[in-house]
Image (cartoon, rainbow, N blue to C red):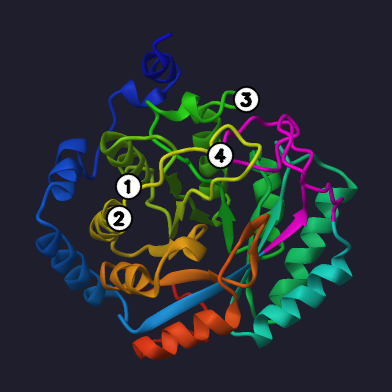
Amino acid sequence: MDYAKACMDEHPSKVKRDERISREEIRRLYDLPLMDLVYRAASIHREHWNPNDIQMSTLVSIKTGACPEDCSYCTQSSRYETGLKYEPLMAVQEVMKQAHEAKAAGSNRLCMGAAWREVKDGPQFDAVLEMVKGVKSLGMEACVTLGMLKEHQAARLAEVGLDYYNHNLDTSPENYCNVITTRTFQDRLDTLEAVRKAGIHVCSGGILGMGENREDRVGLLHELANLPEPPHSVPINKLMRMPGTPMADAEPIDDIEFVRTVAVARIIMPKARVRLSAGRVEMTPAMQALCFVAGANSMFAGEKLLTAANPGQDKDMAMLESFGMNVEVSPYQDDH
């Protein structure tokens, strides 16, 4: 079966639309000599951001496992035998406890993730709204990732002050159905549009190392940069190869190709937070430093990202101190 063709048959980008940047332009950036690419990205980064500041976010899994989706990278899918223990939706009080701890450790944003296919109206969604209110009451930014979202649900999240909604595109439209078949690329775009219409900041990025080629990485960034408004936050994940998932034995992405992706993202989305997300536990401090030079200016703190390991607060703070970098204490400002 021609998987690439099947993915493209469902994808709306074949419809003519205005582009801020073409695939060819992004492809040319990737092909630059590494020193030229990183220098250009670092120069653009310095025009918009303090290069020595890092924004820290903490990610909490508020509902774990038993997801009906078939995302090939995810331990939380009910379709795979990964040994993950199901955990129902956390109580609001427990989330607030973790929010207090995250703030005390230096994070100014709490991201709450629920392994749902889509948001359903009812008591559980009402509880998430209370969690958002609670996080905001601490003076922190609030972000949630809850699966697919309808416009009226996005409006309710906006009413309680949600700052960010995360919904990753994951990969290029051509490669998408090699990764997931239980929702379409258009489903993801529809959720991002609902978020945008509600006035919530869009957080959307992808995962590298899922068997994609460079053209797929070009395609992912092309989709993100040409959304009606570029995302305010772009998480770039390095695949954590989890036992029991179809991608457990995927070939790891080359470190320099990862850095190139960070640099290109910074150049084409200069006002976005570019976040080092999953996979940092497999990155050396030197590689992370190169990513920061290339324009990454945010990262996830804590011992765990949903179900994946993370370096931990003490290790991260020691690394940043060795770089002479600072953890931001002020919230995101729209005037960047």
The disc labelled 2 sits on which kind of residue? Ala
Which residue in the protein does label 4 denote? 248
Boundaries of the magenta span: 60-89
Task: For mark 2, give the secondary structure.
Answer: helix
Quadrant showing the C terminus: bottom left
Q: Are marks 1 and 3 in contact (CB under 8 Å)?
A: no
Q: Disc 4 and disc 3: Cα gap in Å? A: 20 Å
Q: Is residue 107 visible?
A: no
The disc labelled 1 sits on which kind of residue? Ala
The disc labelled 3 sits on which kind of residue? Thr
Residue at the (50%, 54%) spot, across then down: 202
Q: Is residue 182 visible?
A: yes
The crowding category of the residue bearing disc 3, from other C-alpha atoms within 10 Å (few below 14, some 14 to 19, many at least 20), is: few
- Compare marks 1 and 3 and give the one earlier in the sequence: 3
- Compare marks 4 and 1 and give the one earlier in the sequence: 1
- Compare marks 2 and 1 and give the one earlier in the sequence: 1
- Compare marks 4 and 2 and give the one earlier in the sequence: 4
Task: For mark 4, give the secondary structure.
Answer: loop
Of labels 2 and 1, the one closer to you: 2
Q: Disc 4 and disc 1: Cα gap in Å? A: 30 Å
Q: Disc 2 and disc 1: Cα gap in Å? A: 8 Å
Residue 179 or residue 46, whichever sits in front: 179
Please provide percent x and percent y for residue 223: 35, 39
Please provide percent x and percent y for residue 187: 56, 30
Tell whether position 191 is magenta. no
Residue at the (26%, 60%) spot, across then down: 263
Which residue in the protein does label 3 denote? 182
Which residue in the protein does label 2 denote? 265
In the image, 24: left or right of 191? left
Which residue in the protein does label 1 denote? 225
The disc labelled 4 sits on which kind of residue? Ala
